[in-house]
Image (cartoon, helix red, strand yellow):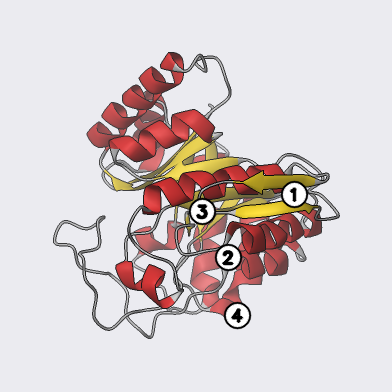
Amino acid sequence: MKFTLSIAMNPLDQLGELARAAEEAGFASIALPDSLFYAETVDTDYPYTPDGSRFWTGETPWVDPLVATASMGAVTSRINFYTSVLKLGSRNPVLLARQVGSASVLTGGRFGLGLGVGWLPQEFEYCGVPFERRGKRVDEAIDVLRLILDGGMVEYHGEFYDFDKIQMSPAPPSRVPFYIGGHTEVALKRAARVADGWSSAMMKLEELRDTIARLKELLAERGRADDPFEYQAVCIDKFGLDGYREQAAVGVTDIITMPWVFDGVGFDAPVEPKLEAIRRFGAEIIDKFEE
């Protein structure tokens, strides 16, 4: 089992200290959220809350996850970073490949790319990208990212993206893992087809059990049953050693958590109680999980 620290919605001047504390406590990774902007009016509900409401406001702090990776990578040496998840649908994959490659190089290969389509039509529209056919566009964008990040002189001629031979150097020092987010059947099939893992939003244990079982079926159909594959989970109803072991029993391999929440510490709280919660989680959970 791996444990990942989520740094979503925390003050940006705390990120370096949180990253160092997580590394010292035994966390494997840091999960970096993605939000381009807060639209005052939206055309669709947020898909991961029961009532469709957003649980942040226009004042909530966000940081570009690739910039945050470079910043936190500079003050750590072992811990990994991955986006959970970056909204690919509104981004140009050639430009994004430059950013991802840079993050990987600057962290010595400690970066993984979690990807989703994106749920908000305004993010597409205001970035000059149509919301329609977003799934097909994202599939092609993933192909472009993998092609460029694998290094060397490459070209691509598709329906949505078209370019002659280009090369981005330096290439990442190791293969950048891709993780696909999303709970729909289309997202699960995408993960089984092209990814090194799947990343959940907020789910209950029974939902995780069913989703992981379906992913394993899809992987087997593609001849990938024995391939390494990560199941990154934000489980909202099982906590503590016993709860985390229950998560492992249904197939979760990477638990994404925010330890200070269990102490009633808010996102905007000072950093010290968060650091203490991270240290305690390392001693009481990570160190004892395999016992």
Q: Are marks 3 and 1 in contact (CB under 8 Å)?
A: no
Between discs 1 and 2, the one toward the N terminus: 2
Name the amino acid, label 3: Phe
Name the amino acid, label 2: Pro
- Foreground mark, 4 or 2? 2
* Structural distance between the alpha carbons of marks 4 and 2: 14 Å
Residue 7 position within the rendered picture, expressed as x and y whole percent measured from the top left: 51, 64
Residue 96 position within the rendered picture, expressed as x and y whole percent measured from the top left: 63, 61
| Nearer-the-camera pick, 275 or 196 | 196
Name the residue at 58% across, 24% down.
228
Between discs 4 and 1, the one toward the N terminus: 4
Q: Secondary structure at mark 1?
A: loop
Name the residue at 62% across, 53% down.
162
Residue 207 position within the rendered picture, expressed as x and y whole percent measured from the top left: 25, 35
Q: Are marks 3 and 2 in contact (CB under 8 Å)?
A: no
Between discs 3 and 2, the one toward the N terminus: 2
Read off the residue under disc 2: 65
Q: Are marks 1 and 2 in contact (CB under 8 Å)?
A: no
Q: Is residue 58 above or below residue 246?
A: below
- Foreground mark, 3 or 1? 3
Answer few, some or many: residues within 10 Å of disc 3's Cα (few below 14, many 20 plus, some between 14 and 19): few
Residue 160: give its label. 3
Between discs 4 and 3, the one toward the N terminus: 4
